[in-house]
Image (cartoon, helix red, strand yellow):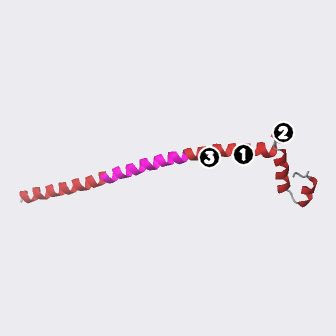
């Protein structure tokens, strides 16, 4: 009787060991996925920061080219205003060819 109980306990122990190994493997897989997602998140955050910086540069360039006639943007400024105006206001603007 004791022999059967010992055999049963060993089988149970082996089964628990297999289940434990499976769970450990799942945890390792999840940790790998987590590390990949963290790396991807970091890369996306860097791209977002770069896009924000470039957006500021583009905004500054637009303001320089279209709003500052002193820096050579006078023609662009007038054409931009003419494009944005309705019919009455466009007649008052100087014509640029």
Q: Which mark is residue 5?
A: none
Q: Which mark is residue 70?
A: 2
Q: Mark 1, residues whose alpha carbon is within 10 Å: few (<14), some, or many (≥20)?
A: few
Q: Which mark is residue 51?
A: 3
Query: What residue lies at 28% left-to-right and 55% top-to-bottom?
Result: 22
Secondary structure beneath disc 2? helix
In the image, 10: left or right of 91? left
- Seen as rendered, the residue at the extreme front is 97
* Label 2 – label 1 distance at C-alpha: 18 Å
Secondary structure beneath disc 1? helix
Q: Position of residue 90 (x, y in %)?
A: 89, 56
Secondary structure beneath disc 3? helix
| Majority SS type along the magenta span | helix
Q: Position of residue 49 (x, y in %)?
A: 59, 44
Q: Mark 2, residues whose alpha carbon is within 10 Å: few (<14), some, or many (≥20)?
A: few
Q: Position of residue 74 (x, y in %)?
A: 84, 45
Residue closer to the observer: 22 or 4: 22
Q: Are marks 2 and 1 in contact (CB under 8 Å)?
A: no
* 63 relative to 87, above or below: above
Q: Earlier in the sequence, mark 1 or mark 3?
A: 3
* Label 1 – label 3 distance at C-alpha: 12 Å
In the image, 15: left or right of 4? right
Q: Earlier in the sequence, mark 2 or mark 3?
A: 3
In the image, 55: left or right of 27? right
> Which of the 4 image quadrants contains residue 16?
bottom left
Residue closer to the observer: 19 or 1: 19
Residue located beneath label 1 in the image: 59
In the image, 21: left or right of 71? left
């Amino acid at each position: 009787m004791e022999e059967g109980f010992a055999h049963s306990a060993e089988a149970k122990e082996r089964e628990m060991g297999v289940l434990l190994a499976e769970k450990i493997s799942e945890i390792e897989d999840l940790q790998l996925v987590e590390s990949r997602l963290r790396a991807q998140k970091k890369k996306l955050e860097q791209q977002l920061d770069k896009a924000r910086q470039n957006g500021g540069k583009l905004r500054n360039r637009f303001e320089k080219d279209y709003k500052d006639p002193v820096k050579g943007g006078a023609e662009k400024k007038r054409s931009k205003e003419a494009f944005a105006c309705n019919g009455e206001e466009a007649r008052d603007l100087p014509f640029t060819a």
